Image: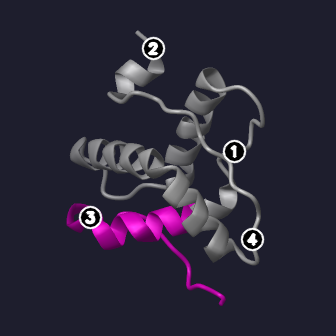
């Protein structure tokens, strides 16, 4: 059974985006071009929490996505930029009631 079947999602290629003026702008563009990344992270985080885990590191989920991306897509191995992990952790906790407080985040330095 493939990793994608085990995780219960169909992998879609990552659409790279051009770098903008700042990380926040880059994240918004990436998220808009790749809504499936949020859906996959949400599914993974909820499965992990429902398995009895009280907390999770977003980087663990991100690396699992990077692994799957490396198997399913060709080209730049780092299409999943580490700069976006904190943004996804905050977005997931803001949007998903069950995930509030699930990821550890640091105060933002704007």
Q: Which residue range is magenta in the image?
A: 85-110
**Residue at the location (43% across, 45% down)?**
36
Which element type, helix, strand or loop, lies under badge 4? loop
Q: Could you tell me if residue 100 is visible in this image? A: no
> Badge 2 local density, few (<14 within 10 Å), some, or many (20+)?
few
Q: How far is the residue under mark 1 from the one under mark 3?
A: 25 Å
> Badge 1 local density, few (<14 within 10 Å), some, or many (20+)?
some
**Residue at the location (54% across, 36% down)?**
64
The residue tagged 4 is 20
Report the disc number at residue 93: none
Q: Determine whether label 2 and label 4 are within 8 Å by CB.
A: no
The residue tagged 2 is 2
* Number of the front mark, 2 or 1: 1
* Number of the front mark, 3 or 4: 4
The residue tagged 1 is 79
**Residue at the location (56% across, 29% down)?**
68
């Amino acid at each position: 059974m493939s990793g994608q079947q085990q995780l219960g999602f169909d992998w879609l290629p990552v659409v790279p985006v051009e770098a903008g003026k700042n990380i926040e702008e880059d994240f918004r563009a990436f998220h808009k071009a790749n809504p499936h990344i949020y859906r996959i992270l949400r599914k993974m985080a909820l499965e992990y929490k429902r398995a009895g885990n009280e907390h999770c590191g977003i980087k663990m989920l991100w690396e699992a996505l990077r692994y799957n991306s490396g198997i399913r897509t060709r080209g730049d191995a780092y299409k999943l930029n580490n700069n976006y992990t904190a943004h996804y952790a905050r977005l997931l906790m803001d949007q998903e009631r069950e995930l509030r407080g699930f990821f550890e985040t640091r105060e933002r330095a704007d």
